[in-house]
Amino acid sequence: MLAPDTAEELIAALRALIRRSRSLNARARAADPDVMPTWLVALLANLGSGEGCRLGDLADRLGITASTLSRQAAYAESLGYARRGADPDDRRASCLTLTDTGAEALHEYRSRFVRLLQEVVPDWTDEEGRDLVDRLERLAAAVDGFRDARL
């Protein structure tokens, strides 16, 4: 088991990494207003991982309210990144899907940040990067398992 001091350091390191990631995105948006906001990236990424989604389920996955998601979905639709239609399983419900334009915009965003990360850590080997990915995925799986067991 992690020692309390180590757990505190890990939490602090994760928070600092999240802050720095947000800062990088904010700087990228300041330099180029066409860079997508992180909330839009999260929305499109969630849509891209499946065949579309009922709005209530999507709001739950994103950890936001239905009204917030409704505004975000309307914005994504206005850009042509998402399309709202009837849920095939329940015609009374709406289903949001990713458009080809949205998939391309998400791909461009990810490609831009892949290049940025490569610039940030030019001295890292692929093995070091893979090791970090494996450890972060292990941490994410532990969090998911804990959450699922507790709820």
Image (cartoon, helix red, strand yellow):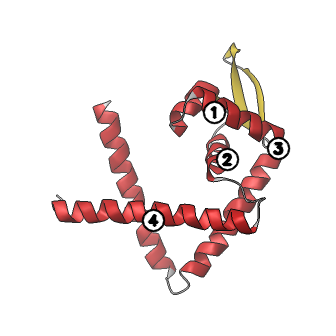
Q: CA distance from mark 1 to mark 3?
A: 15 Å
The secondary structure type at the circle numbered 4 is helix
Report if the CB atoms under discs 2 and 1 are less than 8 Å apart. no
Type of the residue with mark 3: Leu
Specify the quadrant of the image occupied by residue 3: bottom left
Can you name the residue that lies furthest to the top here? 92
**76, 123: nearer the viewer:** 76
Disc 1 residue type (three-letter): Leu
Specify few, some or many for label 1: CA neighbours under 10 Å numbering under 14, 14-19, or 20 or more.
many
Residue type at mark 4: give it: Leu
Q: What amino acid type is highlighted by mark number 2? A: Leu
Q: Which residue is mark 4?
A: 17
**How would you rate the neighbour count of disc 4 (Cα within 10 Å): few for under 14, some for 14-19, many for 20 or more?**
few
Seen at 42% across and 57% down, the residue is 137
**In terms of image quadrants, where is residue 16?**
bottom left
Find disc 2 in the rendering and name its residue: 40
Q: Are circles 2 and 4 on residues that touch, CB within 8 Å?
A: no
**Contact? badges 1 and 3 (CB < 8 Å):** no
Q: Which residue occupies the extreme bottom position in the image? A: 123
- Name the residue tied to disc 3: 79
| Residue 69 badge | 1
Q: Quadrant of the N terminus?
A: bottom left
Is residue 34 found left or right of 70 in the rendered image? right
Q: CA distance from mark 2 to mark 4?
A: 20 Å
